[in-house]
Image: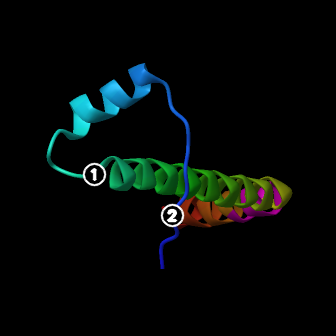
Amino acid sequence: MKEKTSITLSKTTLANIDRVVGSKQSRSSFIQSLVDEHFHRQARAQRDARDIELINRHADELNAEVEDVLRYQASED
């Protein structure tokens, strides 16, 4: 469900929006897509940061496992 709101943008910003969207879509849908994309990127960045934190927290253990596997593979040759 959508709600109507009012925002104030500069004439330059509106002219840029109009130039980009032309008659393909409305200003509202264009702005909505930009805002949605912003929040999507922000959520992805937060997920990535959590993943990196988990990887870093367990890096020593993961690296030890990899070294063990590589030693095992090398000993089979």
Using residue 4 as the reference point, say whether residue 52 is left or right of it.
Answer: right
Disc 2 versus disc 1: distance between alpha carbons? Answer: 14 Å
Amino acid bearing label 2: Lys
> Which element type, helix, strand or loop, lies under badge 2?
loop
Per the image, is 61 magenta? yes
Q: Amino acid at mark 1?
A: Ser
Q: Which residue is drawn at the image coordinates 62% and 51% (left, top)? A: 42
Task: Choose the circle earlier in sequence order: 2 or 1.
Answer: 2
Give the class, few, some or many, for how many residues have Cα within 10 Å of label 1's Cα (few <14, many ≥20).
few
Q: Main secondary structure of the magenta part?
A: helix
Residue at image point 55% right, 64% down: 73
**57 displayed left or right of 52:** right
List x then y, in percent, for residue 58.
81, 61
Image coordinates of residue 48 in percent, x first then y, are: 64, 55
Q: Which residues are magenta?
A: 59-65
- Which secondary structure lies at badge 1? loop
Q: Position of residue 72 (x, y in %)?
A: 62, 66
User: Residue 54: x, y in percent?
Assistant: 78, 62
Specify the farthest residue to the top: 12
The residue identified by callout 2 is 4
In this rendering, the label closer to the viewer, 2 or 1: 2
- The residue that mark 1 highlights is 26
